[in-house]
């Protein structure tokens, strides 16, 4: 019996067609589908019969594992125990995209390859499947990975249940596979992302400042440090807020006091603290003990990388209760200037760390 071919709009895939194919996967079937790299075969990773059938169709040996696809960056934590900053730096830059990372699995002693594809059809299919999707390339082992559904079906017609035709893939070459289970990342398969790209992203130090609204204190800290580090491309400085729900500009007073320092922050837009942002940061500076606790409640793994900013501006006579930098929002310009003085003193010490 020939494989059923389902043609979809590659940019705006029809939900009814994607849902149909997702049901095939949930029932233990195999579905050919496009990604931005090459065409793949989707199967339910948690279904032993489906995985055995996939192995037979691929003609793959029992010892060679299958990678899985996810539809959101944050879902990586469902599959790995690792919280290495290098992993989160890479996925923040290259996901969705042609990067597969091999990480320690939550199953003791095992590893797993994970990718988030940059293709609307693939992302929607993974989302709608509501299961962990294994997705090797849609070719028999040893043959060239296919860039069109027609190329895929040369090997697989009649061996898979259905095939989604989403047109030619944009890259036409497999993803780069990077082993992140050792101290140093190692490329296991060359692809669209080079070793130079990987090393550059991992080697960049990331510094994150956190306050509540990301409109005053963390903005001052971010832009002061950026100014001091101008010309250094091996450090990335950013800021975020624990209470950001709507993106907004810096406060008028913040814009004003920083303008006096020769800094234009009128283009700043606030952003919320996210798990990825926290896990990729090498150093996290918060304004108060409450911010610190809010972050640790959410991502306890970053405990050794998080500091109260005022610790770096504190004198020997300061007590623990003096180490918070109060929020100047709603106060006069003088309060903002005092806040800036304290933050500037701390930044001058932080420069020595980076």
Image (spheres, rainbow, N blue to C red):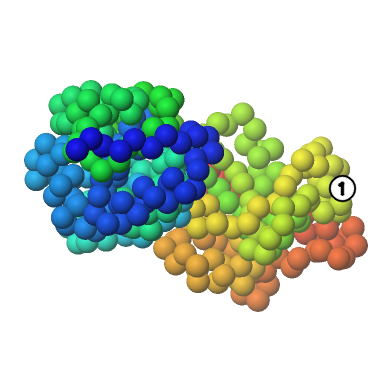
The residue that appears at 86% across and 43% down in the rendered structure is 260
Decide: is 308 above or below 175.
below
Determine if residue 181 is in view.
no
- Mark 1 is surrounded, within 10 Å at the Cα level, by few (under 14), some (14 to 19) or many (20 or more) other residues, namely some
Q: Quadrant of residue 3?
A: top left
Decide: is 351 above or below 81.
above
Q: Is residue 74 left or right of residue 52?
A: right
Q: Quadrant of residue 186?
A: top left
Q: Position of residue 14 (x, y in %)?
A: 50, 43
Q: Position of residue 306 (x, y in %)?
A: 52, 60
Decide: is 96 above or below 144.
below
The residue that appears at 45% across and 55% down in the rendered structure is 74
The residue that appears at 15% across and 39% down in the rendered structure is 57
Q: Closer to the camera, 298 or 1?
A: 1
Q: Position of residue 187 (x, y in %)?
A: 27, 33
Decide: is 201 above or below 25.
above
**Residue at the disc numbered 1:** 256
The residue that appears at 27% across and 57% down in the rendered structure is 27
Count of numbered circles in the view: 1
Q: Closer to the camera, 213 or 308?
A: 213
């Amino acid at each position: 019996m020939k494989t059923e071919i389902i043609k979809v709009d590659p940019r705006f895939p029809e939900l009814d067609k994607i849902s149909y194919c997702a049901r095939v996967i949930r029932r233990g079937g195999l579905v050919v589908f496009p990604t931005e790299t090459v065409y793949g075969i989707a199967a339910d990773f948690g279904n032993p019969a489906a995985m055995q059938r996939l192995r037979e169709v691929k003609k793959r040996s029992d010892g060679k594992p299958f990678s899985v696809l996810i539809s959101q960056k944050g879902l990586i934590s469902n599959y790995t125990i690792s919280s290495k900053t290098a992993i989160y730096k890479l996925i923040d830059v290259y996901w969705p995209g042609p990067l597969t990372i091999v990480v320690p699995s939550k199953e003791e002693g095992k590893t797993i390859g994970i990718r988030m594809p940059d293709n609307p059809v693939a992302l929607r299919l993974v989302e709608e499947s509501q299961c962990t999707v294994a997705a090797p390339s849609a070719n028999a082992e040893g043959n060239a990975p296919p860039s069109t559904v027609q190329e895929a079906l040369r090997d697989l017609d009649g061996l898979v249940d259905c095939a989604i035709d989403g047109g030619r893939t944009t890259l036409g070459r497999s993803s780069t596979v990077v082993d992140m289970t050792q101290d140093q990342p190692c490329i296991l398969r060359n692809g669209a992302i080079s070793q130079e790209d990987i090393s550059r992203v991992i080697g960049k130090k990331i510094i994150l400042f956190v306050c509540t609204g990301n409109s005053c204190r963390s903005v001052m800290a971010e832009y002061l440090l950026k100014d001091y580090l101008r010309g250094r491309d091996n450090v990335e400085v950013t800021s975020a807020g624990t209470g950001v729900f709507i993106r907004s500009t810096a406060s008028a007073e913040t814009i004003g006091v920083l303008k006096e320092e020769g800094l234009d922050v009128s283009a700043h837009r606030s952003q919320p603290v996210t798990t990825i942002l926290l896990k990729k940061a090498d150093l996290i500076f918060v304004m108060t003990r409450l911010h610190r606790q809010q972050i640790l409640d959410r991502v306890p793994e970053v405990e050794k990388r998080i500091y109260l900013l005022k610790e770096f501006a504190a004198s020997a006579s300061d007590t623990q209760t003096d180490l918070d930098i109060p929020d100047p929002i709603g106060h006069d310009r003088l309060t903002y200037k005092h806040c800036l003085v304290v933050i500037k003193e701390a930044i001058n010490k932080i420069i020595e760390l980076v």
